[in-house]
Image (spheres, grey):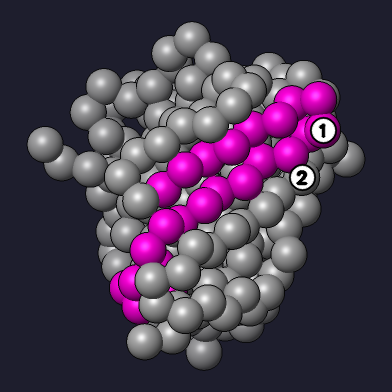
Amino acid sequence: QKEVEQNSGPLSVPEGAIASLNCTYSDRGSQSFFWYRQYSGKSPELIMSIYSNGDKEDGRFTAQLNKASQYVSLLIRDSQPSDSATYLCAVGDTGGFKTIFGAGTRLFVKA
Amino acid sequence: NAGVMQNPRHLVRRRGQEARLRCSPMKGHSHVYWYRQLPEEGLKFMVYLQKENIIDESGMPKERFSAEFPKEGPSILRIQQVVRGDSAAYFCASSSASGISYEQYFGPGTRLTVT
């Protein structure tokens, strides 16, 4: 059973701090990795994709991938109250056709 | 530049009725995925389809649930003889086949309530 594991949280950080969200996965053959943000009552929104080891930065977001450790993370710099949401880690399976979602980590950013 | 469209956004059915959920993928996308999300829970994969083909239905309940993606028109998720436990948000996502990237983009969802 291919799995994607996330700490359910909630993770609470003060406004302006760095939020660090982590994810591990079981399928060693996975080649694609995604982070989605889901506000309460809304649909998931793709915020980052990463395919190679290392860091990928987009604005205040940085995704980090370590395939050897089967570990993906998302850093949110200068966290804002509007970042309060559930963050879903998603991993493409070996064939690439299907994406396995983690259960999500709830983030609260306190003003 | 329409995104993934789903309708209806809200659907109320009585126990025993049929529910039909529709999904139109983003322009240029040929892959459709259906997910179910119960309140305060994660996304559960149900089925993955391409035009006229079901590729993976490993997450679909064996009875009462079916899905299709015809050559013309939207993808349909059909739930027959609904029960209270079917009440959930149903999300559709679409992607294009592009190398190793299968970025999925989600529609707004259909909230099904069974009374």
Residue at (49, 10) in percent of width and height: B99
In the displayed structure, B62 sits above or below B71; it is below
CA distance for labels 1 and 2: 8 Å
Looking at the rendering, in which quadrant would you find the C terminus of chain A? Answer: bottom left
**Side (left or right) of B99 relative to A20:** left
Residue A2 image offset from top left, x and y in percent: 82, 38
* Quarter-of-image position of residue A69: top right
Could you say which disc has been placed on residue B25 in the image? none
Q: Is disc 2 placed on a helix, strand or loop?
A: strand
Of the pair B43 and B56, the residue shown nearer to us:
B43
What amino acid type should be assigned to the residue bearing mark 1?
Ser
Magenta-span inclusion, residue A63: yes
Residue at (32, 59) in percent of width and height: B108
Could you say which disc has been placed on residue A69 in the image? 1
Q: Chain of mark 1?
A: A
Q: Is disc 1 placed on a helix, strand or loop?
A: loop
